[in-house]
Amino acid sequence: MACVAEARGGYTQPIGAARVQRERLFVFGYGFFVWYISESPLHQIRISAKNLGDVAHPDFCPRCFWVKLHAKKLPYQIFPGIFSSIDSYTRLYMRGHLERHQQLPAWLQGLGNVQSVYEGSLHYSKFNILDDTTNILLTGTPDEIFMLGNSEYIIVDYKTARYTGAQDRLYKIYETQLNGYAWIGQQRGIRPITGLSLVYMELITNEDALVHGGNLREGGFAMGFSAFIHPVTLDLTLIPPLLEKTREIFDMPVAPACREGCKDCEQVESLIALLNGGHPYDQ
Ligand code: SF4
């Protein structure tokens, strides 16, 4: 009867655009041995540059990330559409102003000598790149790519939020998101990309705005926004380690452990117990 005398851990090797995992087992029998090689293609993953930013967040939880990568859909994912409406209105407003006046509004001229917008598709179905090393398709939907007078490009993302600069608790996510866009853009021939910026559109809700007659409209009222430009350091070296980490977590056969003390995970456990017949007052 044959017995497994030695087993080596899996390793990876590039083959064309994809990679394969190999496992070698030395199997000894009665006077002969078999060298067994199994090859299985790495499953291709698709992830947006913004979601890749989760990996860079200071409170990153590998378990949550594993679930997000593997679950087809998560429950309770209902978000108000108002923010994407404002972002898209902002984008159209800037484009319209640039077209009419050949320059951005004065409060955005800190972005540089913007002359035009990049006319190629910024939809994630086109604006993506396959990383051969990890077999991950990184996708993005930048709000805007502007071309400067010197033919350099800058990438801008609009955020409808209070401006807190690098204190924004989502800052590491935004930093990854913008560098991810630059990483995709450079490889898709949009070069050189020399600048990244967040543009915060902050609601004006002070006393003056409340009593300002110009805000009164027939049938409603107007709310204003103040713009704040926050430059983000261009550093494409941020992206490959995050893709590697994503691959590593995706390939885990089971979800990693919960982060200690996470209240959300305790609540998920309670829900599971409840659905499995526990009494609601026991939770
Ligand atoms: S520990 Fe918290 S963050 Fe991690 S999987 Fe559980 S709920 Fe998500």
Image: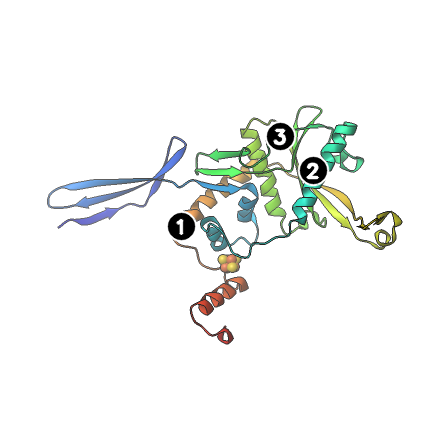
Front residue of this view, candidates 223 and 252: 223
**Circle 2 is placed at which residue position?**
91
* Residue 88 at least partly seen: yes
Front residue of this view, candidates 275 and 141: 275
**Circle 1 is placed at which residue position?**
252
Which of pointers 2 and 3 lies earlier in the amino acid sequence? Answer: 2
Which of pointers 2 and 1 lies earlier in the amino acid sequence? Answer: 2
Ligand 1 within 8 Å of the CB at mark 1: no
Q: As shown in the figure, which amino acid type bears the numbered disc 1?
A: Met
Q: Label 1: few (<14), some or many (≥20) within 10 Å?
A: few
In the drawing, does residue 120 fall left or right of residue 28? right
Q: Position of residue 189 (x, y in %)?
A: 56, 26
Q: Calculate the distance from the C-alpha at mark 2 to the C-alpha at mark 1.
A: 40 Å
Eye-nearest disc, 2 or 3? 2
Helix, strand, or loop for circle 3?
Answer: strand
Relative to 185, say whether 243 is above or below.
Answer: below
Helix, strand, or loop for circle 2?
Answer: helix
Q: Residue, x 22% and y 44% (percent of image)?
A: 26
In the drawing, does residue 105 fall left or right of residue 126? right
Q: Calculate the distance from the C-alpha at mark 1 to the C-alpha at mark 3.
A: 35 Å
Q: Position of residue 46 (x, y in %)?
A: 48, 41
Q: As shown in the figure, which amino acid type bears the numbered disc 3?
A: Ile
Query: Which residue is at the far front?
Result: 219
Q: Residue, x 82% and y 54% (percent of image)?
A: 206
* Residue 111 at least partly seen: no
**Circle 3 is placed at which residue position?**
193
Q: Residue, x 56% and y 38% (percent of image)?
A: 140
| Mark linked to residue 146 | none
Q: Position of residue 88 (x, y in %)?
A: 68, 41
Q: Residue, x 59% and y 31% (percent of image)?
A: 121
Q: As shown in the figure, which amino acid type bears the numbered disc 2?
A: Arg
Q: Calculate the distance from the C-alpha at mark 2 to the C-alpha at mark 3.
A: 19 Å
